[in-house]
Image: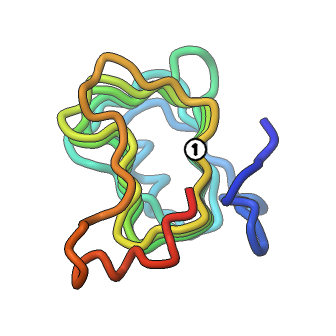
């Protein structure tokens, strides 16, 4: 896929380009790869079952390889990070499939998101320069949240941001 949209602004979004590639196929390998220094790319093969959200560091790519690349439970949490690519994953049965807070230059592409307790993709709290492309949202009642609050004092963090 070719990156388009807001995530191309400025220097763009390159994820873990230039860093090591970690091929993981279970939750322990995934957790170990997540704590490695960035930049890094984590390639998920098979099904990974998480009990809590996985925090993603800046300058990271999380990509599914093969048709069975799936995260069940937990989901992915991006908080106060930048330069993230999430691609080719099935994410299901999590609190939020992907939560993006106070982050920028994020690309979420070709993911299949379903059956989570809250949102499938929530982009909030001043996040900016985010592209969400070619994803499938299904079997869910709260697809996506964009923004944080309509209350002036709280909503100020979103002013002139949320370019999604």
Q: Quadrant of residue 77?
A: bottom left
Q: Residue at x 58, y 57 (%)?
A: 130
Q: Quadrant of residue 30?
A: top left
Q: Is residue 160 left or right of residue 11?
A: left
The image position of residue 80, as x and y in percent, is: 42, 74
Instruction: Give 1 or 20, whichever is nearer the viewer.
Output: 1
Reply above or below: 75 against 33: above
Q: Is residue 47 visible?
A: yes
Can residue 28 be seen here? The reply is: no
Label 1 SS? strand
In this view, the residue in front, 6 or 76, is: 6
Closer to the camera, 116 or 57?
Answer: 116
> Which residue corresponds to mark 1?
132
Expressed as whole percent of the image width and height from the top left, the position of residue 71 reads: 39, 31
Residue found 71% across the figure and 52% down from its top = 5
- Give the image location of residue 127, x and y in percent: 46, 68
Residue 50 located left or right of residue 64: left
Q: Total label count? A: 1
Q: Is residue 154 left or right of residue 16?
A: left
Quarter in which the C terminus is drawn: bottom right
Q: Using residue 11 as the reference point, say whether residue 78 is left or right of it.
A: left
From the viewer's side, name the closer residue of 6 and 92: 6
| Residue at point 63%, 38% (across, down) | 133
Image quadrant assignment for residue 60: bottom right
Position of residue 9 relative to residue 77, above or below, is below
As drawn, 130 above or below 104:
above
- 10 over 46 or under it: above or below: below
């Amino acid at each position: 896929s070719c990156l388009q949209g807001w995530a191309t602004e400025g220097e763009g979004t390159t994820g873990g380009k230039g860093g090591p590639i970690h091929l993981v196929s279970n939750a322990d390998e995934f957790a170990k790869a997540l704590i490695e220094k960035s930049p890094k790319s984590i390639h998920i093969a098979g099904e990974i079952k998480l009990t809590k959200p996985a925090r993603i560091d800046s300058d990271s790519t999380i990509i599914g390889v093969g048709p069975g690349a799936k995260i069940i439970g937990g989901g992915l949490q991006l908080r106060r990070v930048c330069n993230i690519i999430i691609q080719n994953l099935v994410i299901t049965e999590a609190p939020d499939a992907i939560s993006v807070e106070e982050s920028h230059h994020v690309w979420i592409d070709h993911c299949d998101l379903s059956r989570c307790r809250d949102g499938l993709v929530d982009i909030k709290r001043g996040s900016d320069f985010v592209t969400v492309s070619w994803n499938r949202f299904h079997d869910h009642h709260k697809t996506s949240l964009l923004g944080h609050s309509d209350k002036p004092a709280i909503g100020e963090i979103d002013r002139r941001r949320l370019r999604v």
